[in-house]
Image: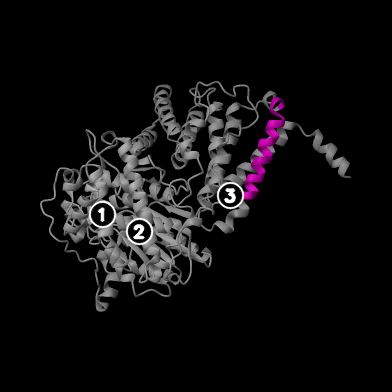
Amino acid sequence: MSQQNSNSNNNIPVSEVYWSLVAKADKKFSKIRDLPYYQRNRYDTYFYKVFKVYTQLWKFQQENRQKLVEAGLKRWEIGDIASRIGQLYFGQYMRTSEASYLSESYIFYEAVLTREYFKDGMFQDVNLSSKQLRFLARFLTVCLVLNRRDMVYQLVNQLKMLLDECKRAFQETDFKEWKLVVQEIVKFLKADPAFMNIRPLRYSVVLDLHPDCLPQVVEAKRKLRLRDALLCSYHPNEVKYSELTLDTFRILQCLEWEPSGSFYQTGGFPPSGVGTGIGQNGAPGPSRVNYSQDISDPTLPPNPRKSILYRPSVTNFLAVLATNCEELPHDGVLLIYLSATGSSQNSSSPSHGSGRSCMSRGGDLEATSTSSLNFEFEIANPISAKWNCLNDQSSCLYIGSRSSGGLSGIYPCDLLPFTRRPLFLVIDSDSSKAFTALSGSEKGESVAMLLSPAISLPISTVDSVRQPSGSSFTSFLTIPLQAFLLMLGFTGSDIDMDMYGKADKLLSSSLNEWGLLLAASGNLNPVWAQTLGDPFLRRLILRFVFCRTVLALYAPTFNKTEFLPECIPSLPDAFLPTSDTCQRTVSQLADTFGATSKFNFSKDTMLSDNRSEEN
């Protein structure tokens, strides 16, 4: 009986088998495409089912390529399959944060590009041109996240040229939306130039302490690990590409492992792009470059999973948050990154990434006094006012359009039900201080909070036209040395790379020293003690200390608490900006770039630095 079925299958034309597989794959693809990126465990089986079908389809067309071509198979149809497999891999990366999926997505997309699957008849068929435009836009996202900037610039040029050709070939078609896509990516790259990526944003065991070498935390009663993160950013007119904002893009990388060695081997790939002529004979499937081997290191733990939301409704935000808390392992901590405009709309506060240029002018301002520091770092909310602060309209963060009112507003009280699980909040907003009301009101677990200043200095790349480069607070947490230099008015072209390397080593060694002191501290709050053993959270905490010290000592913001970030609960006094340990690092960095006069250091710090120079 089975032999008869086998014979009947053999009698079915190859083309019919192929189109049957295509129909089956299309059906499953449309189903998984509409699934949310959260609730990962629930949808894992869907991914494996659809991937199994596409694997079968890809293999079948490889083995029967000649017969299928004779039956009418077009090259763009092969490219469509490869492109969808790339989409599947990238979607699974977004669900799991596993770097191998990102690598596989790149491999398939690069194969589509180098083999020019969509080239034939592109300017005779507007639908085919649209496929190529969508493919380039998706591949751009993969290359951005993968930090393949050489390929990014190549794709941007191709996108521009293709769009110009499409306008000429299809004059009756409106390509306005694609013009906006090009404008978005160009603006994004101007705001995130090579200078911002000198050092990998991801955690590199080459440059940072290996997780096995982190110091033991004396006060730690338990050790939590960053297992999941919810990243949400929305500001009107902010720098973004597609639904990936510049700030979210940086935080995303900051919470992942740098592929071992890959950052320094970007030139190891064969050139690719339109016009190479590779694969014109329809070679079977993408070639396996060594990148997939570079991107995974079996000695490192998996990346924390991340949910990235852009302009979600409040109900969607809370649904994702609830799911993440539900799926959080017993030893896990959930990081929530919220970057949004608050209700207060302080008139003196610049708009996100632009606005009045205290920073741009700050490079020309010099400290006129070395008077003693007089800061109040504790902001205590009276218990009687705490409930009002949790619910007050002025404490709302808008993660969508203000015209939606409460439908797009997140209040501190919205997070209270989720404080039954360990949370690590990073709030970047002019209303961030409203979230201090959570402290003491938690439902089970004390919340760790890093809160931005009420007024944020704009980080800008200084060129002929000042280009916003994201939030200064987020920049200090992800690219601290670049944020420091941009605050002083420097650009990449101003900086000698030997000098930059010296400063980078100084900052890295100082942060490691602070980490040792913090781990050995006998009065470290348990909230920080239980998270300090995680390499990603440890790095954020130490960079926060650096950010607070810099802004506290910087002449334009000196003695102005509205320009200072805050952490809840408090860190030991040894890590306040008044401490010699913190001031000495900032003083040495400022001296490296000849900017000591732009800060107000204590006399003890200045004397200590002078003695060091004499020795």
Q: Who comes first in sequence, dot 2 or dot 1? A: 2
Residue drawn 61% across the image and 52% down it:
46
Q: Is residue 58 magenta?
A: yes
Q: Who comes first in sequence, dot 3 or dot 1? A: 3
**Which residue lies under the disc numbered 3?**
298
Q: Which amino acid does label 1 sit on?
A: Arg
Rendering coords of residue 268 (x, y %): 51, 31
Q: Is residue 419 magenta?
A: no
Circle 1 packing at 10 Å, graded few (<14), some (14-19), many (20+), is many
Please state which of residues 149 and 294 is positioned toward the viewer in this rendering. Answer: 294
Rendering coords of residue 23 (x, y %): 64, 40
**Which residue lies under the disc numbered 1?**
584
SS for dot 3: loop
Q: What residue type is labelled 2?
A: Trp
Rendering coords of residue 2 (x, y %): 86, 44
Q: What residue type is labelled 3?
A: Pro
CA separation, marks 2 and 3?
29 Å
Is residue 262 shown above or below 49? above
SS for dot 2: helix
Q: Who comes first in sequence, dot 2 or dot 3? A: 3
Magenta stretch? 48-67
Q: In which quadrant of the rendered image does the N terminus lie?
A: top right
- Of labels 2 and 3, the one closer to you: 2
Rendering coords of residue 557 (x, y %): 18, 54
CA separation, marks 3 and 1?
38 Å
